[in-house]
Image (spheres, grey):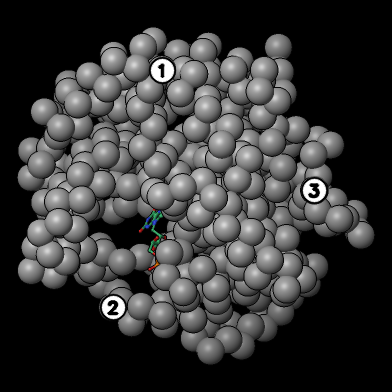
């Protein structure tokens, strides 16, 4: 717990720093992204694709906890994307999923991914506090504002214009923070949210608050993360690590200019096998030959990405991009190659990465046996807990 990089002036800041370090000394935090959904982030038809069921999630969380993996990050999804597999058609609701996993693990941080416009902030704040008490301070909050019209219709909620979604989320997070803060009784008078005579106790565990993250990609989304969050998830550059480094530096500097500390994370998709050739063959088999291309095309339609809107070249690139885990850094290789990419990200200033496998439970042991020791030898991660 010494890796507290925040210059802590108060005990509360120090405790928040420990949460930001995810209670480990590792320079690069590692997490699993998307296992609460069927197929995870692999739009594939292979029979070994991820079930997303509770038993597999629980086994995965226990395995990750034992191995010293820092976090699990779910996808907040309400409706599948169709296709042959109804990609992400079966999902476990993320706050209850997180609370269950936290109760059964000892070290892992587990995030809940919450659509601000769909959850009442006071109920949500109380759910987060409950998960935080269950886990002695290991709950994290991923705020999303939503984008999928289909999902909003299902709740009878009208989506606001893009940037106004973040204006609403600003009110929402301020109301949540009020409920977590020192006042037990308060009124809240935001632009969108007005609450009278709120009573909120208990407070989060340990005199601080849960870690907050966001992954906005637009200017409004990025500004929201810089103003309100501890962790900003952003895409690593497809061009170079130098470009990734520039993005990290810029986000951290923008946060510091507002008197805040911000960690920058990224996401990816890992196919790691004993040899480079094996990894490439499996990637090709699962993602290209057996991709659920009708689901991929459904996702592209929802996002209004077509030859007509983006041109043929970009459409092809996006189609490929959405087939492998709906985006993120593609890492296909033997353990040396995967360890090298992760080490490069760390050197670029990235604080952590959440990634997915086709089948998390089957693939995580090889990753832990082969890649983690390499990262330890490279000084990126400390020895795992025994
Ligand atoms: C790591 C990560 C996790 C995300 N999780 C979700 C999610 O669970 N549900 C969702 O609707 N959007 C999710 N998103 C989408 C973002 O919240 C965001 O809406 C998207 O990056 C577009 O940015 P913008 O909202 O600034 O336009 C995620 C994105 C990333 C990179």
* Between 120 and 33, the one nearer to me in the picture: 33
Q: Which residue is label 3 attached to?
A: 5
The kind of secondary structure element at disc 3 is: loop
Q: Which residue is label 2 attached to?
A: 158
The kind of secondary structure element at disc 1 is: loop
> Crowding at label 2, few (<14), some or many (≥20) Cα neighbours within 10 Å?
few
Indicate the position of residue 325 as horizontal and vertical percent values. Answer: 30, 40
**CA separation, marks 2 and 3?**
41 Å
**CA separation, marks 1 and 2?**
47 Å
Q: Is residue 86 above or below residue 108?
A: below
> Crowding at label 1, few (<14), some or many (≥20) Cα neighbours within 10 Å?
many
- Please state the quadrant of the image where ligand 1 appears: bottom left
* Between 139 and 270, the one nearer to me in the picture: 270
Q: Is residue 217 above or below residue 63?
A: below
Looking at the image, is mark 2 or mark 3 earlier in the sequence? 3
Q: Which residue is label 1 attached to?
A: 334
Nearest to viewer (mark 1 / mark 2):
1
Q: Residue at x 85, y 51 (%)?
A: 14
The kind of secondary structure element at disc 2 is: loop
* Between 239 and 64, the one nearer to me in the picture: 239
Looking at the image, is mark 1 or mark 2 earlier in the sequence? 2
Indicate the position of residue 284 as horizontal and vertical percent values. Answer: 19, 26
Name the side, left or right, on which 311 lies relative to 53.
Answer: left
Cβ atoms at labels 3 and 1 below 8 Å apart? no
**CA separation, marks 3 and 1?**
32 Å
Q: Residue at x 7, y 69 (%)?
A: 308
């Amino acid at each position: 717990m010494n890796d507290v990089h925040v210059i802590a002036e108060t005990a509360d800041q120090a405790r928040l720093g420990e949460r930001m370090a995810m209670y480990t000394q590792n320079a690069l935090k590692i997490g699993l992204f998307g296992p609460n959904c069927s197929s995870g982030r692999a739009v594939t038809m292979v029979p070994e694709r991820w079930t997303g069921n509770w038993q597999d999630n629980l086994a995965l969380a226990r395995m990750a906890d034992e191995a010293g993996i820092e976090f699990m990050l779910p996808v907040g999804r309400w409706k599948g994307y169709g296709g042959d597999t109804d990609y992400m058609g079966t999902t476990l609701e993320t706050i209850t999923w997180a609370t269950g996993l936290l109760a059964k693990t000892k070290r892992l941080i587990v995030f809940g991914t919450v659509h601000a416009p769909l959850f009442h902030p006071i109920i949500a704040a109380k759910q987060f506090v409950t998960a935080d008490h269950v886990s002695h301070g290991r709950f994290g909050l991923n705020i999303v504002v939503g984008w999928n019209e289909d999902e909003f219709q299902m709740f009878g909620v009208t989506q606001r214009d893009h940037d106004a979604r973040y204006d609403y989320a600003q009110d929402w997070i301020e109301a949540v923070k009020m409920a977590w803060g020192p006042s037990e009784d308060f009124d809240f008078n935001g632009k969108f949210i007005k609450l009278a005579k709120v009573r909120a106790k208990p407070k989060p565990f340990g005199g601080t608050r849960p870690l907050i993250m966001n992954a906005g990609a637009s200017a409004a989304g990025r500004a929201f993360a810089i103003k309100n969050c501890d962790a900003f998830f952003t895409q690593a550059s497809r061009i170079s690590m130098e470009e990734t480094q520039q993005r990290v530096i810029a986000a951290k500097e923008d946060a510091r200019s507002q008197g805040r500390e911000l960690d920058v994370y990224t996401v990816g998709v890992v196919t790691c096998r004993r040899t480079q050739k094996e990894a490439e063959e499996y990637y090709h088999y699962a993602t290209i030959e057996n991709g659920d291309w009708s689901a991929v095309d459904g996702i592209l339609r929802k996002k209004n990405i077509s030859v007509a809107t983006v041109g043929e070249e970009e459409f092809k690139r996006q189609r490929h991009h959405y087939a492998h885990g709906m985006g993120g850094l593609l890492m296909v290789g033997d353990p040396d190659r995967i360890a090298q990419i992760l080490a490069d990200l760390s050197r670029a200033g990235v604080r952590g990465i959440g990634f997915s496998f086709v089948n998390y439970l089957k693939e995580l042991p090889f990753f832990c046996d082969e890649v983690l020791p390499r990262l330890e030898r490279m000084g990126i991660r400390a020895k795992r807990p025994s």
